[in-house]
Image (tube, helix red, strand yellow):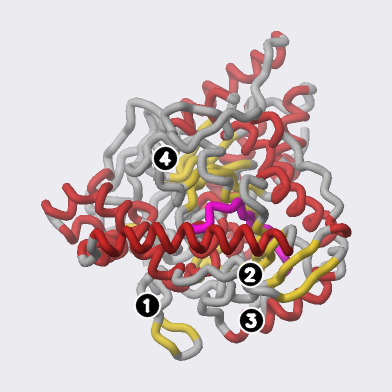
Amino acid sequence: MASTNEIVEHSAVELRRMIGTRQLSPVELLDACIDRIEALNPAINAVCATDFDRAREQAKADADKVVSGEPLGLLHGLPVGVKDLQDTKGLLTTYGSPLYKDHVPDADTDVVARVRAAGANLFCKTNTPTFGAGANSRNPVWGATGNPFNPILNAGGSSGGSAAGLAVDMMPLATGSDTGGSLRIPASYCGVVGFRPSPGTVPVGSRPFGWLPISVTGPLARNVADTCLLMAAQAAFEAGDPLSYPQDPMQYLAPEPVDIGGLRAAFSTDLGFAPIDQDYREDFAAKIGPISAFFGHAEQADPDLGEVDKVFDVIRGAVYLARFREEYERDPDSLGPNPKANYEIAMAMTLGDHAWAHAEQTRAYHEFQTFFERFDVLITPTVPISPFPWEQLALTEMNGETLRNYYHWLAPTYGISITGHPAISIPCGVDRNGMPFGLQVVGPHRGDRFVLGVAHALEQAFAGDPSLARPVPNLTQLAEPTPALVSIVTDPPSQAFPARPTA
């Protein structure tokens, strides 16, 4: 029998193959993932609610299906972590808010239902900021998620628990979502892959504004091929999402072969508008040379995204007004500082602001199409700065200049969100502080398969260069619990694992 470490370190694609060929039992795999969680979660606090007893029963049933020769789903027997913003039937879903600390949904949200239907074993929830607001996965219910490369630092967000858990092999796949960068930022900080699909590719029927293409759901994994596997299970056509469109989900099952040697690549450090830490700017500049050599043509160029900061303020604000009006009017402080700040920013806006923002978004979109007539792919740093301590709720200044608001530092990713183009963050070595460096790869309109193919080709090219290859955490440094944010909840959720580390 393989050791626990050997089992969990296999890719999701390989694990699924091993299950299908009876080389690995789903029970054995689940136990290995649980062992890894029990060993390392006290150090990074990536996993929050769990359902191990039910998961073990499912694993046994999954094993029986393999033996009996029944048809198996794409994700049959694979333990999958689910972001705590996404409803899971029978499993505690808190959204990181004390308002929902005992909330157990009676149904899965749409994307979770598709992942479950594909055979996944949904055995745990992963940590997130309160209501997903911000890129620091800490909340008063579960505490903070630490970075697996240095647990006192930020793991990113809002899918931070998913990314951190993947980085230390607690699970082979995890779900996430992305408005301003919530799939891509934690992937960058934790050295894994996070893919933001085109709006509607992964249907989301629960958005308060169904026609607004800013918030999407997508996959996180440890490599691009695994990302494609989960993407194939998530993609669909569902009338409940007005942005959804007919498609064959199986087209995402494996990366599309792409010859990047024939592509025209644009490298942009700051998209022409985003604040970037000077050290990080220099780190990216050092990587541009070797990465450029993989392309047929490469040059530095910035797209014209206009006043995208203000556009994001308005559109993001409208979502918060629609979602949290009742909670805010009852008790503004109950939302937590970041959601409250978003709501109050939005309250000051006028109908004229909304009209302007949507017109400016459309103008920026058209400019982006012109940009992609010149280039096949756009490459940027995913984040603008090395991870900072999670004790700091958000970044307030950069290069000595005060930032506009708590999410201004997310500009490299939310600028792309506004365009609606698909984007992926892949690992690209480390920065000068030894922390994972993420590369954001952006493709043309509806070019989801193309982006995944380019990312896979780059991943393969990076594997031969230690300065560009995916870094992995030193697990021996995570053997002891790490002091984490003390929960303000005096009556903790009933489905909690493990006991939250205390200062």
Mark with earlier residue (2, 1): 2
* Residue 26 visible (yes or no): no
Mark with earlier residue (2, 3): 3
The residue to which callout 2 is attached is 381
Instruction: Tell me where residue 403 sits by quadrant.
Output: bottom left
Mark with earlier residue (4, 2): 4
Q: Is residue 420 magenta?
A: yes
Callout 3 secondary element: helix
Q: Amino acid at mark 1?
A: Arg
Instruction: Tell me where residue 257 sits by quadrant.
Output: top right
In the rendered structure, find residue 86 and report the number of the disc placed on it: 4
Q: Which residues are magenta?
A: 418-429
Q: CA distance from mark 2 to mark 3?
A: 9 Å
| Front one among 191 and 417 | 417
Callout 4 touching callout 3 (CB < 8 Å):
no
Residue visible at 40% across and 74% down?
A: 392
In the rendered structure, find residue 372 and report the number of the disc placed on it: none
The residue to which callout 3 is attached is 281
The residue to which callout 1 is attached is 404
Please state, as top left, top right, bottom left or bottom right, where the C terminus lies in the image: bottom left
Residue visible at 49% across and 69% down?
A: 411
Mark with earlier residue (4, 1): 4
Q: CA distance from mark 3 to mark 1?
A: 20 Å
Callout 4 touching callout 2 (CB < 8 Å):
no
Q: CA distance from mark 4 to mark 1?
A: 29 Å
Q: Amino acid at mark 2?
A: Pro
